[in-house]
Image (spheres, coloured by chain):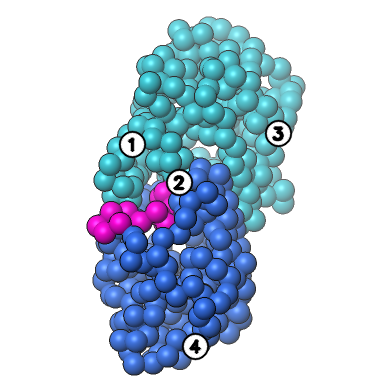
Chain colours: A cyan, B blue
Amino acid sequence: MKKAVCLLSGGMDSTTLAYVAKDLGYEILVLHTRYGQRTEEKEAECAKKIASLLDASEFTEFSLSHLLAFGASSLTDPGMEVHDHDESVQGGIPNTYVPFRNSNLLSIATSYAEARGAEAIFIGVQASDYVGYPDCRPEFVEAFQRVIDLGTSDETNITLMTPFVNMNKTEIVRTGMELGVPYEYTWSCYRSNGPACGTCDSCYYRLEAFKANGIPDPIDYE
Amino acid sequence: MKKAVCLLSGGMDSTTLAYVAKDLGYEILVLHTRYGQRTEEKEAECAKKIASLLDASEFTEFSLSHLLAFGASSLTDPGMEVHDHDESVQGGIPNTYVPFRNSNLLSIATSYAEARGAEAIFIGVQASDYVGYPDCRPEFVEAFQRVIDLGTSDETNITLMTPFVNMNKTEIVRTGMELGVPYEYTWSCYRSNGPACGTCDSCYYRLEAFKANGIPDPIDYE
């Protein structure tokens, strides 16, 4: 059975993506990251539940908490405020940006995939909603694929799978509903471990996506 | 004063490179990695000493010990043996290869550089001696530069500095002698925290480099 490393945060996008990978017939190796974000515990709890529902063959957690020490993101720096969606700087990079986070995630995922002989890595990046994050762009993903091809052994063939890169969150939720994704076990809020604030960027886009699909979001909001 | 992040393992190459960066007028931010290798303590001690001699403005340590959990390298897997140089598989990838290590190092270095406004990252990769490590090749470095350009914010400009990529270890030691590098505070052995074994790949190339320069290696060997 072909293996895939799935980067699973426990959020809406990565959970839907792991269900896509399962639907494609992959054996799932879950890789979950802690990096000192405010909602660390809640996300870990959701990721574990989803991994178990997906019958994942491995659940591996790792910490990028050294990114916390660098500061410069409101997700990890207690001295910075997480803005409401309507306070966010339009067109700029949101202060929830963790510098170069996706490259760190993909590097670890590639080490894991190479060590386990997995042939795919699924990562839920998508350019459409968060235009502000440079490391979610399709060009970034293509450039990283080249780094994988050149930086791993010649016998290793690992493909980055990013089917969501050009989808918006409404389309992602629609895909997830078709696959029966249990969204009650996912977490997206940047601010709180529960109930969700409903107003940060992440809650805002999640709620919009459910509304556009005409279905209620099953998690609790303030 | 322009800032540079220097990846400093405490070995011969990265130490020489940090002296090159200092000589080029950079303020030095040292980034040292632990990743569960056998010689972790000795390397950390050397890196700290060198950082202090270079008057580095920051010394940051981080752990990639999750790479240890993946196994598949004799540097980190106690169940695997570190081969002598003359037992190594010729032409293949040495079993000291840590899957995709340099991409992990460069990702963290880039996060650090972006958070601190540094404009250069110095990494002592070199293709000539260790042809077996895919993530030391010039093409890999070029591909990673593109990932940096696309994955960081538009105002960020970070250049990967790899002046050693096409040099051999004899040339590196010659450069270091000219810059007064204190090689007595560096460590290269893969096997032991002291005295050095003298026979693993890393000791072998180091000793050859000193011999070719007609000078004694100041560290202790078995």
* Residue A64 % position (x, y): 59, 47
A75 left or right, relative to B91? right
Camera-near label (1 vs 4) is: 4
B179 left or right, relative to B70? left
Query: Which one is nearer the viewer's eye here, A95 or B185?
Result: B185
- Tag 1: Cα neighbours inside 10 Å, few (<14), some, or many (≥20)? many
* Residue B55 % position (x, y): 59, 82
- Whether residue B112 is visible here, answered yes or no, is yes
Query: Which one is nearer the viewer's eye here, A133 or A12?
Result: A12
Dominant SS of magenta comes to loop
Query: What is the spatial separation of the Cα atoms under label 4 and label 3, in whole angstroms?
Result: 50 Å
Camera-near label (1 vs 3) is: 1
Look at label 1 and name its amino acid. Answer: Ile
Q: Residue at x 34, y 80 (%)?
A: B208
Camera-near label (4 vs 3) is: 4
**Label 1 SS:** loop
The numbered dot on residue B218 is 4
Query: What is the spatial separation of the Cα atoms under label 4 and label 2, in whole angstroms?
Result: 33 Å
Camera-near label (2 vs 1) is: 2
Disc 2 target residue: B72
Query: What is the spatial separation of the Cα atoms under label 2 and label 1, in whole angstroms?
Result: 17 Å
Disc 1 target residue: A158
Q: Chain of mark 2?
A: B
The numbered dot on residue A41 is 3
Look at label 2 and name its amino acid. Answer: Ala
* N-terminal label among 4 and 2: 2
- Same chain shared by disc 1 and disc 4: no
Q: Chain of mark 3?
A: A
Q: Chain of mark 4?
A: B
- Same chain shared by disc 4 and disc 2: yes
Look at label 4 and name its amino acid. Answer: Pro
- Whether residue B18 is visible here, answered yes or no, is no
